[in-house]
Amino acid sequence: MADEEKKFSKQLIGKTVVSKTGKRFGEVGDIIFETRSGELIHMVLNNPTSYTQKLELEKSKEGKILIPFSAVIAIGDFMVIAEEDII
C-alpha cells in the first residue's frame, strides 16, 4: 500500500468495513495512530454489526470495537480487511 496514492484520514472516516468474503463489520469511526512514527495502529468501529459484536475483538476504554490497521488489505469504496488477521 505504500506506493499507492495517499489518502487523508478524513477520506477514511465513515467508510464501510467489510471482510474479503463480503461480511460487513461496521464503519470507520476514527483512526488511532502512533504520534511519533505516524504508524496506524487501529480503526475504531462505529455501528458494528451483530456479527462483529459476537467476535471477541479488542475494545477501547469507551467500549468501541478496535480493528488492527494491519488487517487492512484494500481501501476503495470500502475498507477491506482480512478477517483471519483479527480473530
Image (cartoon, grey):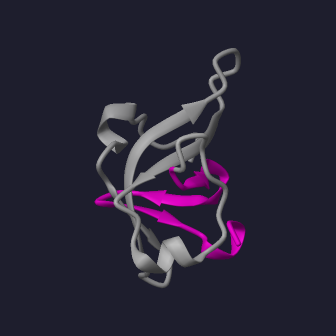
Q: Residue furthest front?
A: 62
In the rendered image, the quadrant that contains the C terminus is bottom right
Q: Is residue 50 above or below residue 72?
A: below
Q: Residue 28 appears at what percent x and percent y? A: 39, 50
Q: Is residue 34 above or below residue 24?
A: above
Q: Residue 40 appears at what percent x and percent y? A: 61, 36
Query: Hey, which quadrant is residue 3 in on the image?
Result: top right
Question: Residue shown at 48%/60% (left/top)?
Answer: 74
Q: Residue 12 appears at what percent x and percent y? A: 36, 43
Quick check: is 67 in the magenta stretch?
yes
Query: Hey, which quadrant is residue 58 in on the image?
Result: bottom right
The segment highlighted magenta reads 64-87
Question: Residue shown at 49%/47% (left/top)?
Answer: 44
Question: Residue shown at 54%/50% (left/top)?
Answer: 63
Question: Residue shown at 60%/30% (left/top)?
Answer: 33
Q: Residue furthest top?
A: 36
Quick check: is 74 in the magenta stretch?
yes
For the image, the number of numbered tags is 0
As rendered, which of 15 and 73 lies closer to the eye?
15
Q: Residue 84 appears at what percent x and percent y? A: 69, 76
